[in-house]
Image (tube, rainbow, N blue to C red):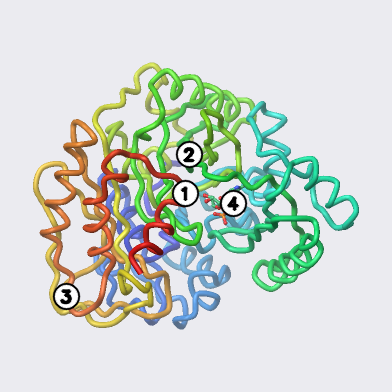
Amino acid sequence: MPITRLLIANRGEIALRIHRAAHEMGIETVAVHSTADADAMHVRLADHAVCIGPPAARDSYLNVAAIISAAEVTHADAIHPGYGFLSENAQFAEIVETHGITWVGPKPEHIRTMGDKIEAKRTAGALGLPLVPGSDGAVSDITEAKAIAEAAGYPVIIKAASGGGGRGMKVCNGPDELETLIQQAGSEAKAAFGDATVYIEKYLGNPRHIEFQVFGDGEGNAIHLGERDCSLQRRHQKVLEEAPSPVISPAERERMGGIVAKAMADMHYRGAGTIEFLWENGEFYFIEMNTRLQVEHPVTEAITGLDLVREQIRIADGKPLSVKQEDIEFSGHAIECRVNAEDPWNFTPSPGLVDMYHAAGGMNVRVDSGLYAGYRIPPYYDSMIAKLIVKGRTREGCIMRLKRALEEMVIGGVKTSIPLHQALMKEPDFIDGAYTIKWLEEWLARRD
Ligand code: ADP
């Protein structure tokens, strides 16, 4: 039975993004929302809308019972989880499937495996992906931890097995502080993720963050859609992403893409996924896999011409991959700026009434956002309010167009990160593509 009515278990720009793909496929949409989001754009545009609870995410967007009930009363036959919230919750995926609803996402067992970063590394290693050197699994015993850190070489990074969103990581510079930092990381991980398990990795000095977009049909066929460079980060959170990476050659893309696609084919992966690597001195080191659509997926769409959400829905519907690897062509260059409602320099959140709104336009400019004049940005959720995605035939042309598009964007009444992006566009290092995951924070520190 093909999908005819899709429930979107998310909010903000990604809910709108999914709605758009669904409507273009002739699929009706069901928006679920908290009381704080009753006026949201995706709620206005969806064919049906159900309020699922109060503002706090745990009572609404993470409220499994309320979401399943909403699907049942509206007769939705599929659920798309977007990113964040329940998107990487294997149990939710299982519950959805148990209710006879199509899950627009990977197989629950793969979500579970990749959600545990230790299991993910083991699996990736077994599939032939290069790993960051470090512990083979969880570390608890301090003598053993010291031996592992010694073998990897200091500095090392202590990471939470259930971590995410750049949280729960501690850099350790020598054996004296190892025990304390392991304990701290463990108790912080327990508080944040309900799981105190930690592991150790070599801390790479100055890598880039390069990730590959993959798609599988769940039956042993998989493709890659090239890489994205997400090295511009603040506190391990991405600020701007681009595709292709300024440092990856077509030959290297083909080689590494082939390796990741084969790994996904071998595991019979289904749907969209992202394989994240750190890249240093020409070498890739796997760090984790995300079993969902990523915030930065539009830069891949821009250079491949493929609609990734449509592809996800097709696969969930049991259709084959719409393209073969040899049919995929990469053309031009794309950059995405994440626009947050926050002070551009001290990053304090700036929710509230948007009294004026004008989206940038023109050739090869895309704005994914639920904003409109008169909308009130609620203080309860992530501060990202828009994504500006621009494509050019060359990276240089893309940057010129992005500068022009940033000038056109008007979001009145709240502070946004647009001035930060504008300043970045003038930086020689950025213009040269010569930046690593450390660059942005060092640049910000220099400006103080
Ligand atoms: P999360 O799931 O919380 O996003 P990741 O494992 O993807 O965690 O890491 C997020 C970011 O943290 C990376 O993009 C990188 O900036 C930094 N990081 C992670 N592991 C290492 C490492 N071994 N060495 C240096 N930096 C790292």
Image x and y of residue 99, in percent: 59, 57
- Amino acid tagged 4: Glu
Q: Is ligand 1 less than 8 Å from the beta carbon at label 1?
A: yes
Instruction: Point out the tag, 3 or 4, that comes first from the N-terminus.
Output: 4
Q: Mark 4 against mark 2, which lies toward the viewer?
A: 2
Q: Residue at x 25, y 75 (%)?
A: 415
Check contact, mark 1 vs mark 4: CB within 8 A.
Answer: no
The span from disc 3 to disc 4 (Cα, nearest Å) is 43 Å
| Viewport quadrant of the N terminus | top left
Say which residue label 2 marks: 211
With 311 as the anchor, is 376 left or right in this view? left
Check contact, mark 2 vs mark 3: CB within 8 A.
Answer: no
Q: Is residue 47 visible?
A: no
Instruction: Point out the tag, 2 or 3, that comes first from the N-terminus.
Output: 2
Of residues 144 and 196, the one drawn nearer to the viewer in this rendering: 144
| Viewport quadrant of the C terminus | bottom left
Examine the rendered structure and indicate whether residue 394 appears above or below residue 107: above
| Badge number at residue 437 | 1
